[in-house]
Image (cartoon, rainbow, N blue to C red):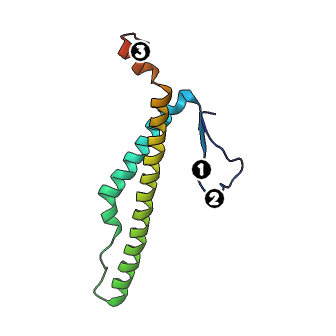
């Protein structure tokens, strides 16, 4: 298994999670997480504003509903920003691993050396 949690079973313990990654999969995982981060950042940047509705009518109930939905949207956006921060931390840890162990994408390394695969 290329990626696996250090936890066996359906629940995770409290505290920091541990992930074990096969050395030859570190770059792939890092790229996949960067793609996920990009999607999450795009959502926050371009879609989050649409989550806060204007009141459907001029009555107090419509205003209250819009405010409640807006608060829920703000919470969801804050959670998404927290998710992005956690992704940043994981990606940076993977980047440190790549630097520390001198890992390289074999295709990129071969191209750099002038050797085609």
Label 3 sits on residue: 110
Q: Which residue is mark 1?
A: 17
The structure residue drawn at horizontal position 28% and vertical position 87%, both measured from the top left corner, is 58
How far is mark 1 from mark 2, CA to CA? 8 Å
Give the x, y percent position of residue 40: 39, 52
* Tag of residue 33: none
Where residue 89 sits in the image (x, y, percent)?
46, 47
Kind of element beneath mark 1:
loop
Quadrant showing the N terminus: top right
Residue denoted by label 2: 14
Give the mark nearer the N terminus: 3 vs 1.
Answer: 1
Q: Secondary structure under badge 3?
A: helix
The part of the image, by quadrant, that contains residue 55 is bottom left
| Residue 83 located left or right of residue 112 | right
Of discs 3 and 2, which sits in the foreground?
2
Left or right for 82, reference 23: left
Disc 1 + disc 2, Cβ < 8 Å: no
Instruction: Please identify the quarter of the rendering in which residue 117 is found.
Output: top left
Q: Nearer the viewer, residue 58 or 15?
A: 15
Q: Mark 3 and mark 1 in contact? Answer it, CB < 8 Å.
A: no
Q: Position of residue 41 (x, y in %)?
A: 36, 52
Tell me the residue at 44%/58% (across/down): 82
Q: Quick one: label 2, few (<14), some, or many (20+) residues within 10 Å?
A: few
Q: Looking at the image, which residue sits at the far bottom? A: 60
User: What's the CA distance linking mark 3 and mark 2?
Assistant: 42 Å
């Amino acid at each position: 298994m290329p990626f696996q949690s250090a936890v066996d079973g359906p629940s995770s313990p409290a505290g920091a999670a541990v992930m074990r990654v096969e050395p030859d999969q570190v770059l792939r995982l890092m790229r996949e997480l960067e793609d996920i981060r990009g999607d999450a950042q795009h959502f926050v940047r371009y879609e989050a504003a649409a989550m806060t509705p204007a009141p459907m009518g001029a009555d107090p109930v419509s205003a209250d509903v819009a405010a409640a939905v807006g608060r829920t949207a703000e919470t969801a956006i804050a959670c998404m920003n927290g998710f992005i921060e956690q992704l940043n931390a994981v990606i940076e840890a993977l980047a440190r691993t790549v630097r520390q162990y001198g890992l390289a994408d074999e295709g990129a390394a071969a191209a750099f050396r002038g050797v085609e695969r």
